Image (cartoon, rainbow, N blue to C red):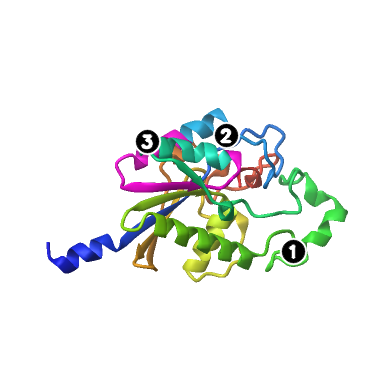
């Protein structure tokens, strides 16, 4: 191998943004940034599956959102590589005014007129943390993980909306979107490849898709009483 080829390989870093596994949420609330929501038994199986998928990868840094579901998803990955689990507040779920409320199809918060005032601007959005603010913090978290794992791979466990928004930004899509069309299934990996400090490609894989309930998979049609919003 030439010196230039060797240097080029050392300059490649991959940062995987992983969405957490399924959460135990029998009441079907939009839990958002609330504490006390842990992985279900199925969610723990999802986390283990992704850890197995990444076991032979050159992962040297694992970091997660401070929320329990993200920490619990990241732990098997960190353990399998003998790494300490770091925490980055920038990986946290997006803020949302509907946090703590049910948010299903045909029931829940959207049926109450008092909540309609929060739906006036889908472009910002008016019901939660501005998309552009999510981009800024998530890009900061990505770059920090890149620097921590320079020349290797990092895993950052976060949440559906921030992952989809930063991917949309990198791929130069508009930030406002139909939530039903997000490609970010539970325990999925959205992988950013850097050459030096520049992102040169984005990939997407679903190592645990066979464990994901059908109504929570990307592109699934809404089912009354079963909202995709729960597992954000």
The residue pinned by badge 3 equals 80
The label number, if any, that marks residue 12 in the structure image: none
Question: According to the image, label 1 marks what residue?
Answer: 126
Mark 3 surroundings: few (<14), some (14-19) or many (≥20) residues within 10 A? some
- Looking at the image, is mark 3 or mark 1 nearer the viewer? 3
**Horizontal placement of 169 versus 130: left or right?**
left
Residues at circles 3 and 1 in contact by the CB criterion of under 8 Å: no
Residue at disc 1, secondary structure: loop
Query: Residue 155 at what x, y percent from top left?
Result: 43, 49
x 40%, y 48%: residue: 61
Looking at the picture, how far across and down is residue 199, in whole percent? Answer: 40, 66
- Quarter of the image with the N terminus is bottom left
Q: Secondary structure at mark 3?
A: helix
In depth, the one of 120 and 107 nearer the eye is 120
Is 176 within the magenta? no
Measuring from the top left, give residue 59's x and y in whole percent: 35, 47
Q: Is residue 54 magenta?
A: yes
Q: Report x, y in % for residue 27.
A: 72, 34
Mark 2 element type = loop
Which span is picked out in magenta? 47-68
Q: Which mark is residue 39?
A: 2
* Residue positioned 56% across, 43% down in the render: 216
Mark 3 → mark 2, Cα distance in angstroms: 19 Å
Which of the pair 1/125 is nearer the observer?
1
């Amino acid at each position: 191998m030439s010196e230039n080829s060797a240097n080029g390989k050392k300059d490649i870093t991959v940062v995987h943004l992983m969405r957490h596994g399924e959460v135990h949420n029998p009441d079907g609330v939009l839990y958002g940034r609330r504490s006390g929501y842990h992985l279900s038994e199925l969610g723990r199986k999802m986390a283990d599956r992704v850890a197995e998928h990444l076991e032979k990868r050159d992962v040297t840094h694992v970091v997660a959102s401070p929320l329990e579901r993200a920490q619990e998803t990241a732990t098997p990955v960190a353990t399998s590589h003998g790494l300490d689990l770091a925490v980055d507040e920038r990986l946290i779920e997006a803020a949302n005014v509907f946090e703590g409320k049910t948010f299903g199809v045909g029931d829940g918060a959207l049926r109450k007129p008092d909540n309609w005032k929060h739906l006036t601007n889908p472009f910002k959005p008016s019901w939660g943390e501005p998309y552009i603010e999510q981009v800024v913090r998530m890009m900061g978290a990505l770059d920090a993980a890149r620097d921590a794992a320079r020349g290797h791979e990092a895993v950052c466990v976060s949440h559906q909306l921030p992952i989809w928004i930063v991917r949309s930004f990198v791929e130069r899509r508009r930030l406002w979107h139909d939530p039903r069309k997000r490609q970010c299934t539970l325990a999925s990996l959205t992988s950013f490849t850097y050459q030096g400090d520049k992102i040169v490609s984005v990939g997407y894989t679903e190592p645990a898709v066979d464990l994901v309930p059908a109504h929570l998979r990307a592109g699934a049609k809404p089912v009354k009483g079963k909202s995709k919003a729960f597992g954000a």
